[in-house]
Image (tube, helix red, strand yellow):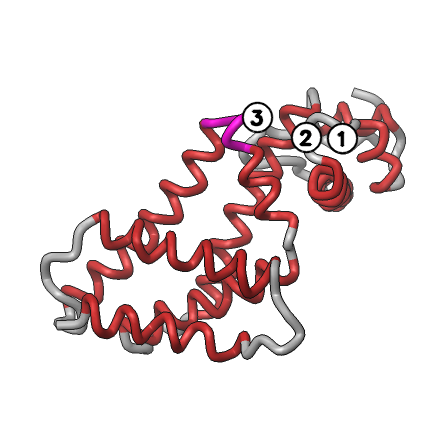
Amino acid sequence: MGRGQPLQSDENSGPVTERGRRTRRKLLDAAKLEFGEKGFHDASISDITRRAEVALGTFYTYFESKDEIFRALVRDFSDGVKEAAAAGISASATALAIERDALAAFLSFAREHKEIYRIIDEAEFVDPASYRAHYENTAQRIFERLKAGGATGEFRDDITEADAWAVMGMNVFLGLRYAVWAKDDDAIEDVPERAMQILKRGITA
């Protein structure tokens, strides 16, 4: 490894230096724009590095191929959704309020990162394992929250995995409509509360 080159650990932990983490972040952000605008097949490594303002050779310090950075980007989006939801909810909130706030946080995230829809959708064909993992992991987090609400008596005590997938499906399409396809006169701030009314009538005890 060349002198001054960022040291790397394994794929999951990423670069071990702050400089390395910043460069990797620049590449992921550039890939988000490149894949988001052009799609996977028309995007190129050279254009990703141009957007990131790094040398072409630097790319291969962090990723072996276009496929690998695409997979990393899908995981990055999944982590971003998870972190946004966690930051948006309060541990002391009611079960319904937790779902409302998680949805509000997701809508905010999707408005800021509209590329998520095109990239996640393409993952179904480019990297089916990442596509499936994204939705399975998201549904599992929702399932755990709903079960916790059932344990406190706020939701029914017969919550199943299907309930979690139904909630996730609602959230995904609300994000598509009110984040990606948002209109100037949309009352986006009202959407999470409207969604919670559906849950209130459907799964509350």
* Pointer 1 local density, CA inside 10 Å: few below 14, some 14–19, many at least 20: some
Q: Using the rendered view, name the quadrant where residue 47 is placed.
A: top right
Instruction: Give the numbered dot on residue 40.
Output: 2
Q: Nearer the viewer, residue 173 or 68?
A: 173
- Locate the N terminus by quadrant: top right
Q: Nearer the viewer, residue 117 or 23?
A: 117
Residue numbers of the magenta segment: 123-128
Question: How far is the residue under mark 3 from the one under mark 1?
Answer: 13 Å
Compared across the picture, whether 150 is left or right of 187 comes to left
* Pointer 2 local density, CA inside 10 Å: few below 14, some 14–19, many at least 20: some
**Principal SS element in the magenta part?**
helix
Residue 145, percent from left and from top: 28, 60
**CB under 8 Å between discs 2 and 3:** yes
Q: Which residue is drawn at 63% across and 32% down?
A: 70
Type of the residue with mark 1: Ala
**CB under 8 Å between discs 1 and 2:** yes
Compared across the picture, whether 111 is left or right of 86 comes to right
Name the residue carrying label 3: 126
